[in-house]
Image: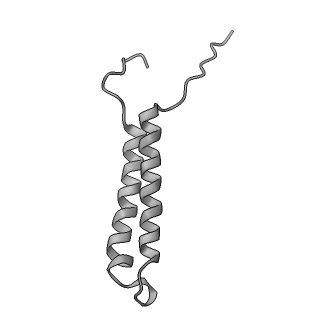
Amino acid sequence: MTENNNKLAFSKENYFIMLLGIALIIIGYLVMSMDTHEFGFGFLGLTLGPVIVFLGFLTEFVAIFYRSKNKSAKD
């Protein structure tokens, strides 16, 4: 009747890149929380932490759209 495909939505490389992005997001939030200035208005809270979080979300975007070059057109 119907063909049962037990394939994952992403490849192993995609999941690795996603984990890297999640780690970057967590590190970015930790960096923001380490700021010692009042209300987080120092360099860590306003510049470095948000840039790291942005890079983490950008990495997630890349992980979703990444496709291996040696993968055939059928997959």
Q: Which residue lies furthest to the bottom in this view?
A: 38
> Residue, x 41% and y 81% (percent of image)?
35
Residue 41 figure quarter:
bottom left
Give the residue at x 36% y 44%. 62
State the image quarter where residue 25 is shown.
bottom left
Q: In this view, does 10 lie to the left or right of 44?
A: right
> Which percent across, then down, holds residue 33?
47, 76
Q: In this view, does 52 lie above or below 8?
A: below
Instruction: Give residue 13's position: percent from left, percent from top.
Output: 41, 35
Number of numbered tags placed on the structure image? 0
Question: How are the colours assigned in the image?
Answer: one colour
Q: Which of 34 and 7 is in front in this view?
A: 34
Is 37 or 10 nearer to us in this picture? 37
Give x and y (percent) for residue 40: 42, 83
Q: Is residue 6 left or right of residue 66?
A: right
- Indicate the quadrant containing the N terminus: top left, top right, bottom left or bottom right: top right
Could you tell me which residue is drawn at 36 percent across and 63 percent down?
52
Please tell me whether residue 41 is drawn above or below residue 20 in the rendered image. Answer: below
Q: Which residue lies furthest to the top in this view?
A: 1
Name the residue nearer the viewer: 73 or 52: 52
Q: Looking at the rendering, in which quadrant would you find the C terminus?
A: top left
Q: Which residue is drawn at 41% across and 16% down?
A: 74
